[in-house]
Amino acid sequence: MANATPMRIVYWVVLAVLIVAGLVGLVQRLTMGHEVINHGSLIPWGLWIVLYTYLGGLAAGLYVFSALGSVFEIEVFKPLRRVTAVGSLIALAAGLLLVWFDLGHMERFPELFFRPSSTSLMGRMSWVYAGFFVIVVVQLVLDYGGNATAAKWLGAVALVLAVAFAGTEGALMGVLGSRPAWNTGLFPIRFLVAGLVTAGAALTFILAFLWKAEGRDEMLRWVTGITLGLLIFEALMEFAAIETMLYGGAPAVKDALNLAMYGPDSWLFWGLQVLVGMVIPLVALVFFRGNRVIVGLGSVALMIGFVAARSNLLIPVLSVPELEGITEAYYSPRLSTVYVPSLTEWLVAVGVIALGLAVYSFLWDRLALNQPEGA
Amino acid sequence: MPDIPRVLEMENAILRMMDDIQRALQKPVEERHWVMVIDLTKCVGCDACTVACKSENKTPPEVAYNIVLQDEVGKYPNVRRVFVPRPCMHCQNPPCVDVCPVGATYKREDGIVVVDYEVCIGCRYCIAACPYGARMFDFGETYTGNTPNPQEYENIEFEYGHEHNRSAGGSPIGNVRKCHFCLHRLNEGLLPACITDCIGRARYFGDLNDPDSLVSELLGRRQAFRLKEELGTNPSVYYLT
């Protein structure tokens, strides 16, 4: 570990503790199966899938920022192409790890590659993810080897795949006619934009607190400007979606929205998504653009708030039964319309994120991600 | 095929439906279209169908292929209860089939939507896609798990004509499960359990492609509807009013 300052030691100890906690959760998952996971058959997806959509969007968004430097050759983004590309790979790997743990039969995941269904977006996604992963790894190898032209063309392909999987994550839900609140053409776009905003915030954080090379202020100005624009666009889309859902009048849609905004977990919407995820970052990015620390903290708030935003897109919609009276017709805790993640789910989620951060921190030094040479 | 004893009068619906089934089984599978018809004017909400299904398929506590929805209609004092049994709809355009990433769930040529327990990865995308809430995940729970050990009779079940042992933690634990019109019984010329156990004779089953079958006759004679027809899923379960 280079420069073993007390701060770095504390950081690594915390990560190690969290990874061990994740391993404890993983052992519980592997030995007790889904009995220790709190989703049910009405709400079939929980925390791990929420985080998967979040991390998948973050991965796509980071790669778009990477492509601004590597593919479009915008001068100010060139030094950021590696730090974002590696971050993209790690975020995607972490998200897919959570999906893997979420499968009822983890040992059958190769089926996704060997017998993918052409009609299933999830079936196609497995190949898109794999293709993206391989291409970006090869692109990074070429980039470090000095073959910028080949890296650029591979980057163009990876960019298409990144946009495709970010949008498809939204489309996974958007195509379901069984869930009217999801079944809109806006859904894939919302996922894509949310991913871009989150990536902008992550990059803002890196530039504000971790980037030591020269040119940081110029980069920060660009990244915060883009993030601010995307955040305003995201807020506009959120408002448009809420307006049409509220006034559209379809009961299932209104029920889901009312649950998110006024239900028992409404603090996730008003507290985390709106206040922490939108208002605080907006204030930081609009009124304190020159203050690196406040902008950096605002970006942390955005990243936290957008986890809640993903949860608010998924869980309330699943909490509305497809047919009225299902929960009264047959009693089972697994037919509950309430979802609270179990301790196992939290442990594994925290452990996977900590593992991702540990790998990223390790590569930060090993691959000299913050060194602008070769830019 | 079993020789059906004529102990009751020929007009008995059960005997007639069994005749219908045996006639259908003589045809190539692609020429059959199994449908269920449920007479809501006869259903008394006793849940015998739910219990029969659980007993036949040995479903765990968290899984019920058939449930009976209840609703209260009218305003006091003029109220009445309405019961709507809900098995899998066996849609002819099943949304659950299209979304399955590995093709583990598919529609047979005779219209029955099934799950291949040996292929299903347990992603639960099909649960989210089903507009009827007819799919449930097997978490591995048992009724007798705290007694202190699960009883053996809970471990073995014979869905799809194969023996599955849940005690080892394998399939169908970790799979999505659903009603399959008691395919293992159907293949032996028997009616689904919920049909034979219905105390009000509210449920009927047979081949819609056979104009002489009881289900064809009922659907030709009575007013019928299907749940959420506007989605275009084209369910194979009809409700008589």
Image (cartoon, grey):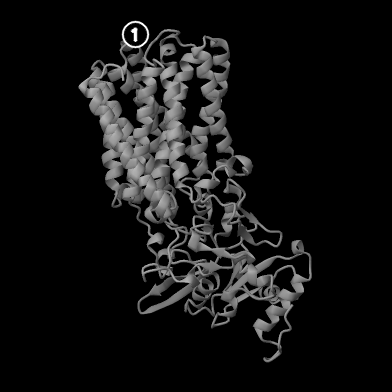
Q: Is residue B141 visible?
A: yes
- In this rendering, the answer to whether B109 lies above or below A188 is below
Type of amino acid under label 1 = Gly
Residue B69 against residue B1 in the figure, above or below: above
Disc 1 is placed on an element classified as: loop
Residue behind mark 1: A215
- Given residues A85 and B68, the one toward you in this image is A85
How many numbered dots are placed on residues in this image?
A: 1
Residue B179 in view of the camera: no
Where does the C terminus of chain B fall, quadrant-wise? Answer: bottom right
- Direction left: furthest residue: A6
Q: Which chain carries label 1?
A: A
- Residue at 41% from the left image edge and 52% from the top image edge: A31
Q: Position of residue B168 (x, y in %)?
A: 49, 60
A107 with respect to A194 (left or right) = right
Q: Position of residue B71 (x, y in %)?
A: 43, 70
> Is A177 located above or below residue A58 in the figure?
below
Residue A191, image x, y percentages: 45, 35
Q: Which of A235 and A9 is in front in this view?
A: A9
Quadrant position of the N terminus of chain B in the picture: bottom right
Q: Which quarter of the picture shows residue B139? A: bottom left
Q: Residues within 10 Å of mark 1 (few under 14, many from 20)?
A: few
Say whether residue A313 is left or right of residue B90: left
Instruction: Report the side of B35 relative to B31 (left or right).
Output: left
Q: Which of A70 and B168 is in front in this view?
A: B168
The residue located at (57%, 29%) in the rendering is A131
Which residue sits at x=49%, y=18%? A67
